[in-house]
Image (cartoon, coloured by chain):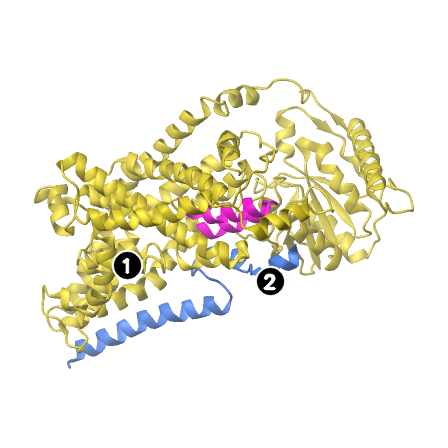
Amino acid sequence: MNITDIIVIVVIALIIGLALNKLIKDKKLGKKCSGCPYAGACTTCSSDNIENIR
Amino acid sequence: MKVALTGNPNSGKTTLFNTITGKIEHVGNWPGVTVEKKEGKIKKELNRSGEDIVAVDLPGAYSMSPYTSEESVTSEFILTENPDVIINIVDSTNLARSMFLTTQLLELGIPVVVALNKSDMNDKKETKIDVDRLSEKLNCPVVKTVATKSSGNGLEQLISEAAKLGSSKHKQQGPRILGASKPQNKDEFEAADKRRYDFVNKVKNEVEIRKISSEMQTRQDAVDRIVANKWLGIPIFVAVIWLVFSISQAWLGPWLADAFVGLIDAFYGLVEGLLGGSANPFLSSLLLDGIIGGVGAVVGFLPLIMVLFFCLALLEDCGYMARVAMVMDRFFKKIGLSGKSIIPMIISTGCAIPGIMATRTIKDERQRRTTAMLSPFMPCGAKLPIIALFAGLFFGDKGWVGASMYLLAIVVIIFSGLIIKKITKDDSSSSYFIMELPEYRWPSIKRATISMLSRAKAFIIKAGTIILVCNAIVHILQTFNWQLQAVAENAADTSILASIASPVAIILAPLGFGLWQFAASAVTGFIAKENVVGTLAVTFAVTNFIDVEEYALVGGAGEVSVTFGITAVAALSYLVFNLFTPPCFAAIGAMNAEMESPKWLWGGIAFQFGMGYTLAFIVYQVGTLVTTGSLGTGFMGGLIAVSIMVSIVVYLMYKKPSEVVVKNLSEAV
């Protein structure tokens, strides 16, 4: 394994790590779609709170 | 301090909320866009009080007695959360209708400020409202506002009045319409409503002077007679949709995409150059083809999507889409739905999730569930790259492919609605559809640009997260076999991915695309539909779908079909399959939340799968018969599968209601 391989592994790990981090963060915030501008509002809805609303 | 923004549907609450908070919540020029409350801090430049003020945007309501579930959100918030101030947004072009709610809000004891919104439209029509007199009659501050304007919009004064009232702990005194006793029964409620209407009309007559009375025929009415005409409405709609798809996918879109893809190519070349030949081939390929190539193939369609959303935002903003709901109403009535079901479907062209959520504006449970089941058939933003890919590669970037998919979706929805009506044995008379048509206005370039950019941002984030991770996994799975040894070049058929996807490919063979690459793409599409394009790029090792020159050099679309191993008819079948099979998992989650019935959810998913499979089978087999004179591969197997699915549906349609149901019904009667 040469230095280029190590750099590539680090870059790939960084890219995938950042992507996963964002996905996990969004999941914790209750968003179902990463990136969607309306995800915060539109996916806060669950059967329970619809039942409450009704 | 908490300020509640409330008012009738389509009075401009969310536009005002966006302007005072700087947020970008979805707005639309029709009623029922907002179905959940949203919060945001009011901008410092508008709030001089020194105290933090949080604005809460509530769904539109006609009264404090809720009729639909989103109206309940409004009344429940105001009655239980005790906001410090209520800003009542009143559509000043329709004062009498808007003030019914105002009078109810004034009786709650919470300070109220009335924002006379859309005042610019009144100025144009030379309608004068005596603000001071109205304020005196309602016993609350009244401020003229134009929420769509960024300056000179009256919003600073509005916030100042709200802050003043909020900090003074002033108890609002209502106009004493009903007296001390509260209505107790239906007759008393009706009498109370009548007194309220009388009061509202009296106030309106005293404060408003209209040059153009509402009975007079205006230019808007003349346009509506054509655009919403029983016979002309549909051809006009078809022409508009064809034009929108042509601009986005045949004219302006590809031109912009070409330039954009050049940047992605340059980046790919730069990284390739940096790696040289010194990196491990697997690592190099994972980074270049799996991550950059896979994500780049999806992101390359961004300009086409942006142009399409820009055009759709313009159509929404000018008031045309609300007319489409009116035009479609008569077709929807025949299938037991109403024009109200159209709004979720139009919203679904952006994303199926808010579209499915918008079904909660529909009171009738069966209609709501049916609409939630059928809305995902509309081609959402995530499906557009698939449409653009196949339109570009197999049909020479023709705008008709996208437009025909959009229109086919409407036909499929109507046909499916008819089937569901029969299955659910719905024989109720169709409900009336009453919708307030927004006035036509020049669409705002700024609003359309904001809408387009917010969707573009979402698309890029999605490509950089879920699509990127999926492409990396797909690339790894197709590089190794089950012994975790790298498969030889051109031997990807022995990879883990191929062995997982091949059984699925057998089921798809009668549809014309029985290759494991297409099966894998269709499966990853359930995670996010954009994955279909990304996975195709990774599995076929194509890093650039937009620039078709390399294919054109070696013989055009015919050569592409050799690369993909399918015919143009099979490509169309694949497109239909991806559009009409179940949506992504997130949308299925939204269906689950709105349907509130496992039976409806699983029935819906099965129905969507059956519909997608059957349509793709018909497209491929009939198309192949027409173009080659013989049937396509796997005809008999596909025919058996389709016959079984159709038989089940026909059985359910004509099955007599069970005795239990009949008994329950007779008991109910």
Q: Residue at x 30, y 41 (%)?
A: B253
The dot on residue B295 is: 1
Q: Position of residue B342 (x, y in %)?
A: 50, 39
| Direction front: furthest residue | B659
Residue stretch in magenta:
B352-378
Residues indicated by labels 1 and 2 sit on the same polypeptide chain:
no
For the N terminus of chain A, the quadrant is: bottom left
- The residue tagged with tag 2: helix, strand or loop? helix
| Chain ID of residue with mark 1 | B
Image-based side of B367 in relation to B48, left or right: left
Chain B colour in the picture: yellow
Q: Is residue B247 above or below residue B283?
A: above
User: Toward the viewer: B218 or B123?
Assistant: B218
The dot on residue B424 is: none
Estimate the spatial distance between the alpha carbons at disc 1 and disc 2, rounded to whole Å.
Answer: 37 Å
Figure disc tally: 2
Disc 1 versus disc 2: nearer the observer: 2
| Direction left: furthest residue | B554
Q: Residue at x 36, y 41 (%)?
A: B307
Q: Quadrant of residue B242?
A: top left
User: Toward the viewer: B114 or B216?
Assistant: B216
Packing grade of label 1 (10 A; few <14, some 14-19, many >=20) is: many
Residue under circle 2? A48
The chain whose colour is blue is: A
Mark 2: amino acid: Asp
Q: Position of residue B274 (x, y in %)?
A: 17, 67
Q: Residue at x 66, y 24 (%)?
A: B126
Question: Is residue B511 shown in magenta?
Answer: no
Image-based side of B116 in relation to B520, left or right: right
Packing grade of label 2 (10 A; few <14, some 14-19, many >=20) is: few
